[in-house]
Image: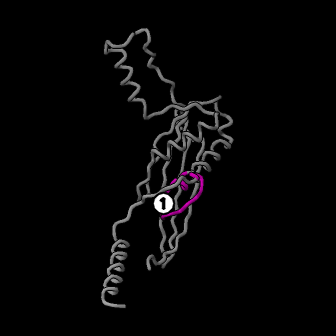
Amino acid sequence: MNKSGIFVFFGLTLCLALSACGPKAFTQGKYVDPNKITMLSDKFNENDMQLIVKKLVSSLVNDGAIGNLQEKPVMAIGKVSNRTSEHIDMKLLTDKLRKELIAVRRFRFIDIDSRGNLQEEYDYNKTSGNVDQSTVSDPRQIAVRYLVSGDIGSYVQTVGNDKLVYYKLTLNLTDVKTNEILWSDDKEVKKSFEKRTIGL
């Protein structure tokens, strides 16, 4: 190979090396089944959430105490605290929990978070002078009788190249009138990971 050929060869090799080391971006995607379990990291993810919530909802609706409640009692999802060391979208979790319970068709639900918005809308309708008063709704709301609340905790154990991640979601069903806890249960998720070398 002559000198010019060698320069061309090394030039092409350098260009390929630079392009391989340049910035990368996620440019091509595809839809995946949201129910398919995929563990890309050791963090709490949507698969953990679905697994835990479905198990707890099944426990609640099949508990003997629920059979003694009044027909279609009024429930609300209260505070579910995050006691883990990582960020977890608790709104996403409580929304999922409420959705699964509503799907059972044995309860009526109100949204505690919307109370402020409802009151603001009623005040506007009543006092702004811009609304036909014959169409203004009665602001009285249905009282919550049963409140679902709880917390999620975790711990991480690392030994050598092995890592165990553990999450536990605990929920309680409380009678708001008497403050009696009618049902309580927790569900766990355990995931194990192995540290591997990444690269060439």
As drawn, which residue projects farthest toward the top? 134
The N terminus, quarter of image: bottom left
Q: How many marks?
A: 1
The C terminus, quarter of image: bottom left
Main SS of residues in magenta: loop
Q: Nearer the viewer, residue 42 or 61?
A: 42
Type of colouring: one colour
- Badge 1 crowding class, 10 Å Cα cut-off, few under 14, some 14 to 19, many 20 or more, is some
Please report the residue visible at 65 percent of the width from the left and 28 percent of the height from the top: 71
- Residue occupied by mark 1: 154
Report helix, strand or loop for mark 1.
strand
Figure check: 8 above or below 84: below
Magenta residues (range): 33-49
Q: Nearer the viewer, residue 134 or 32?
A: 32
The verdict on residue 99 being magenta is no
Residue 174 point in image, percent of width and height? 54, 39
In the drawing, does residue 133 fall left or right of residue 66?
A: left
Residue 194 point in image, percent of width and height? 52, 74
Figure check: 80 above or below 109: below
Please report the residue visible at 59 percent of the width from the left and 39 percent of the height from the top: 101
In the drawing, does residue 16 fall left or right of residue 168?
A: left
Q: Quadrant of residue 48?
A: bottom right
Please report the residue visible at 48 percent of the width from the left and 60 percent of the height from the top: 154
The amino acid type, in three-letter code, at marker 1 is Ser
Q: Is residue 105 visible?
A: yes
Residue 144 point in image, percent of width and height? 52, 30
Figure check: 184 above or below 118: below
Q: Nearer the viewer, residue 161 or 34?
A: 34
Q: Is residue 186 visible?
A: no
Please report the residue visible at 64 percent of the width from the left and 34 percent of the height from the top: 105
Residue 27 point in image, percent of width and height? 43, 58
